[in-house]
Image (cartoon, grey):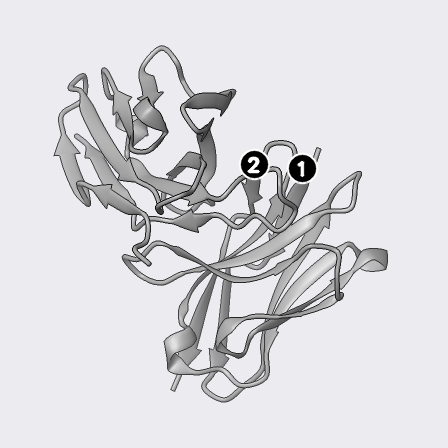
């Protein structure tokens, strides 16, 4: 069965510093992977998705993620954090193309300090 | 393009009462999903519709939860009777069609339910 594990429920960085949010997946078949962001009192917004094309995926707001099959990882990065990046981030795996069901990680809260 | 609409945004009820949530997906989206997000956790799929048919309701507590998508557009999710542990945010999402590898789910703002 597919699953995702996000390492660290809370990450704190200074404004301008590198953002690194870690995600490892478990899947017996090539996975479809996503990162979603949830701002306070708002719905989930898609940041980026991996669908077996390029292993380095660029998303919105300067975020990117690299799919590493050998490490079963899909970490999210951003070179320079902005105060507006403070939110909760979810790593997500799609179960299969037959159902579209998404399995969410527990989430990582990103705090950005001035 | 309008996004996924949900109402109400907030609801407070007593335990054993009933409650209903409404969702209007993005126009043209065949697939509709209801998720439950308990505080501190990631969303969990409750039910998935393709047009007006159910694709997956394996995690829907059918003794108290029900959902329908009449005419394959709007959907309602009902809880009757509510329990304290039903306190959560209920998210609706829609997508063009889950059979596509590039299919993306778009989420509404959610309904925050508090059961007292």
Residue drawn at x 19%, y 25% as measured from the top left: B19
Report the quarter where the C terminus of chain A lies.
bottom left
Q: Are marks 1 and 2 on the same chain?
A: yes
User: Which element is circle 1 on?
Assistant: loop
Q: Does B113 sit left or right of A85 as displayed?
A: left
* Left or right of residue A90: residue B10: left
**Left or right: residue B8 compared with residue A13:** left
- The tag on residue B107 is none
Q: Residue at x 43, y 83 (%)?
A: A82
Rendered-image quadrant of the N terminus of chain A: top right
**Above or below A107: residue B70:** above
Q: Position of residue B30 (x, y in %)?
A: 45, 36
> What residue is rendered at 66% in x and 64% in y?
A75
Q: CA distance from mark 1 to mark 2?
A: 7 Å
Quarter of the figure with residue B8: top left
**To which chain does the residue with label 2 belong?**
A
> Pointers 1 and 2 in contact (CB under 8 A)?
yes
- How far from the left and from the top, in percent, is residue B26? 35, 47
């Amino acid at each position: 069965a597919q699953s995702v594990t996000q390492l660290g429920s809370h990450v704190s960085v200074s404004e301008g510093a590198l953002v690194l949010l870690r995600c490892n997946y478990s899947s017996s078949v090539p996975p479809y992977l996503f990162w979603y962001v949830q701002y306070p009192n708002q719905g989930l917004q898609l940041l980026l998705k991996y669908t077996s094309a390029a292993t380095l995926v660029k998303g919105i707001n300067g975020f990117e993620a690299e799919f590493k099959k050998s490490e079963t990882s899909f970490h999210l990065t951003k070179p320079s954090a902005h105060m507006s990046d403070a939110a909760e981030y979810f790593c997500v795996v799609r179960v299969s193309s037959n159902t579209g069901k998404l399995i969410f990680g527990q989430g990582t809260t990103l705090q950005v300090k001035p | 393009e309008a996004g996924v609409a949900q109402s109400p945004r907030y609801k407070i009820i007593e335990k054993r009462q009933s409650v209903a949530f409404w969702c209007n997906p993005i126009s043209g989206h065949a697939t509709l999903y209801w998720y439950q997000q308990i505080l501190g956790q990631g969303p969990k799929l409750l039910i998935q519709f393709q047009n007006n048919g159910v694709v997956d309701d394996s995690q829907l507590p059918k003794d108290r939860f029900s959902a329908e998508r009449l005419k394959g557009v709007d959907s309602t999710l009902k809880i009757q009777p509510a329990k304290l542990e039903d306190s959560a945010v209920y998210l609706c999402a829609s997508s063009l069609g889950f059979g596509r590898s590039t299919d993306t789910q778009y989420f509404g703002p959610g309904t925050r339910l508090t059961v007292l």
